[in-house]
Amino acid sequence: MTRSLLTGNGAAAWGARLALSDYVPAFPITPQTEIIEKISRWTERGEMDARMVTMESEHSMITAAASAAASGIRVFSATSSQGLLYGMEMLYTVSGWRAPFVLVNVSRGLASPITLEPDHNDIMAARDCGFLQIHCATCQEVLDSTLMAYRLAEDQSIRLPVIVNMDGFYLSFTREPVEIPQAEKAADFVGEYDPQNIRFRASSPVSQAVAVLGGAPYSYFRYESHIAAQNGIAVYDQLRVEFAETFGRDYPAIESYCCEDADIVIVMLGSFATKAQVAVDQLRKTGVKVGLLRPRLLRPFPAALFRELLSGKSGVAVVDQNISMGLGGVLHTELAGALYGQADAPRQLLSFIGGLGGRDITLEEFFEIVSVTQNAVAQQKTPPPRLLYTEQEMREMRKLQAAASVERNELNNSGAETNG
Amino acid sequence: MAEQSVSIYRSMKDLPSTHLLGTGTPMCAGCGGLEALNQLYDIIGEKSVFVNAAGCMTLLSVYPFTPFRGSWLYTAMASAPAGAQGVRDALDILIQKKRMNPDDDMQVVVLTGDGSAYGMGLSATSAAMERELNFLYICYDNEGYGNTGQQFSAATPHGAKTATSTGSAGYPGYKKDLFAIWAAHKPAYVATIVGAEPVDLARKIEKAMSMKGPRMLIALSPCPTGWDFDPKETVAIGKLAVKTGVWPLKEYVDGQVQHTKVPRERRPVEDYLELQGRYRHLFEPEKNVRLISEIQKRVDDYWSNVED
Ligand SMILES: Cc1ncc(C[n+]2csc(CCOP(=O)(O)OP(=O)(O)O)c2C)c(N)n1
Ligand code: SF4
């Protein structure tokens, strides 16, 4: 078994290559660009038998990706942040075409203010678009999930595009030892692309993505996509077993860490969950019964599995790396929806927002999160959602503001002098 | 010209007498865009996939009906050329990897209105030409956002009344020169057409079909609903657009622009304008001589620069 040092971006590119993608429409954006650069080198040298085309926008990129998939070939594409949002109209549009393909999103915070660093607001904005979503925490997982994503997308009972999500910088640019599966083994696992009846051929003309008149046919097709997405739960579970048998790595829909006997459970997505894992280890040493759940599958939402895993727990802390203005954390509300009214549901479900724009979540903060949750359980009183921010950070921010106002005053004064 | 003498379409009697495009579409009676499409489709044929952007023609294919014998893909308002890129690339890949019989190949045709072509989709179109995409682009130009109720677009002519230019001077802007913008990309072919000139139209689509690369057509599309005229006048208005010189019929090939039908004695633009409700404010309650002369002057200036 050979392992190579790969970044998350490199792992995603390997996933596309090993899945024998035929076509890669692309558009550059930090921190995703390395994926398409790598693929372009491979295609130029003939190491990957695919055609790459650089489009002029992500809106066009997603249109081209889905149109090619709808013509009957296997497609890969990648984007991030502003790019994902620029293509948003097409994310919603093409999922309804039922033409499967895989899109990697490298999560990055959204403007404003503009930043390059990661959080999950980009991918959360796409949560209702009809693409299934797999969230990764390691570079190995990025590669493996890309292979699994093709199986999921192309499954007879699903036929929907899938997004594989990783965090910018933390995964995209971090090198980790990754086992690159054998080409034949990966090809066998993914299988040949079967376009079924979704393809364009002169001898069998079809109309795809046609308009409907009225709410009844519209609802029918929308419900069909929803039901197909939900089929993803069962399909994923089978796939996971097959993947584990083939490659020896097991990826449950929700990764559960030290949860079995836990009273308090932290729920988090993506690579920042590995920080929470360290906190769990430390707290366990001091006797605190705390665990961690990290959903890999976000769409379809594994609600039943969440209920099962959280049944009988006393408190849950959801740490959202996103913020829905005027509401709070998205994952928190989704979990509340899944747990509400369940007999053995945890009594306390707390919301924390952190890690926005790459802001770290420190070990101490995780300790605090757990302690606040324990208090809530003890007092049977849920505190309002908490926005993680330290006094130190506030002081630094105040300094920046002070510097900004000094600059502004100087400008104003010098302006007054010359005008005066 | 040499290439035109080989055309099989010399006169009306050479044109197909039965049409390939099905009837019973929800387009308005007298739709000039549908008139052009009907003629184009006869020559493009059923080995085609139409990639459509949002507009009136989107309603040609409403589940579960379509007037097309070939294939269809609706995309969105801005990205039909990108859809064509995906389809074309996929077909090429399938043929190259021997996963599709080359007989199953198709002509990839973008079909959009002017709102999409002159505006929202221009970036995608420009990029498709840059990449020398092998496709046909048909823009049916009804000079406004027709589907949403004929608000002005970048294709609306100066002085025309639209749902968003209702004042006595009509639309204050000027129609964008899409032909020149497209031609500046040096694609294989660019042409203007109108359904009221079927032989000219047939020759141009025939020529476009014989070429590879980006082949771009702009069809002036008299629109009874948006331009406010009696549907039976569609052909007359189309002919007048040519005879007054308002709509020059031309083509771009190999860096050269040729006019394919030069109106020797141009009729006054008034003849064209007065048939259409969208210009009624130029004639009532009193004649707006200044604006009409301005429109006439722009047409005259255009033709004074055209070499015979
Ligand atoms: C992104 C987006 N914005 C707006 C619309 C609404 N819309 C639908 S059709 C249309 C007009 C299109 O105009 P044009 O391309 O000239 O075609 P026509 O309607 O005249 O056939 C508009 C604005 C849309 N479908 N998508
Ligand atoms: S509004 Fe105009 S372009 Fe649209 S269908 Fe009616 S006549 Fe044709």
Image: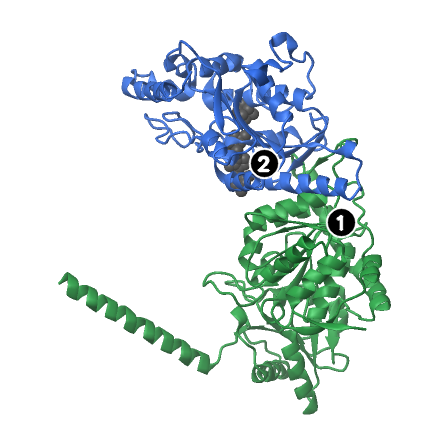
Shade representing chain A:
green
Q: Residue furthest bottom?
A: A286
**Which SS class for mark 2?**
loop
The vertical placement of B223 against A73, above or below, is: above
Closer to us: A299 or A275:
A275
User: Quick one: quadrant of the C terminus of chain A?
Assistant: bottom left
Q: Position of residue B163 (x, y in %)?
A: 43, 30
Other residues around mark 2 within 10 Å, as few (<14) / some (14–19) / many (≥20) = many
Closer to us: A376 or A254:
A254
Residue A202 vs residue A80: left or right? right
Q: Amino acid at mark 2?
A: Ala
- Image quadrant where residue A45 sits: bottom right
For mark 2, name the chain.
Answer: B
Shade representing chain B:
blue
Other residues around mark 1 within 10 Å, as few (<14) / some (14–19) / many (≥20) = many
Could you say which disc has been placed on residue B63 in the image?
A: none
Both labels 2 and 1 in a single chain: no
The residue beneath circle 2 is: B53
- Residue drawn 83% across the image and 71% down it: A248
Q: Position of residue A300 (x, y in %)?
A: 72, 58
The residue beneath circle 1 is: A159
Say whether mark 2 is within 8 Å of ligand 1: yes
Asked whether the beta carbons under mark 2 and mark 1 sit within 8 Å of each other, the answer is no
- Image quadrant where residue B294 sits: top left
- Residue drawn 71% across the image and 54% down it: A46
- Image quadrant where residue A413 sits: bottom left
User: Quick one: quadrant of the N terminus of chain A?
Assistant: bottom right
The vertical placement of A302 against B51, above or below, is: below
Q: Amino acid at mark 1?
A: Arg
For mark 1, name the chain.
Answer: A
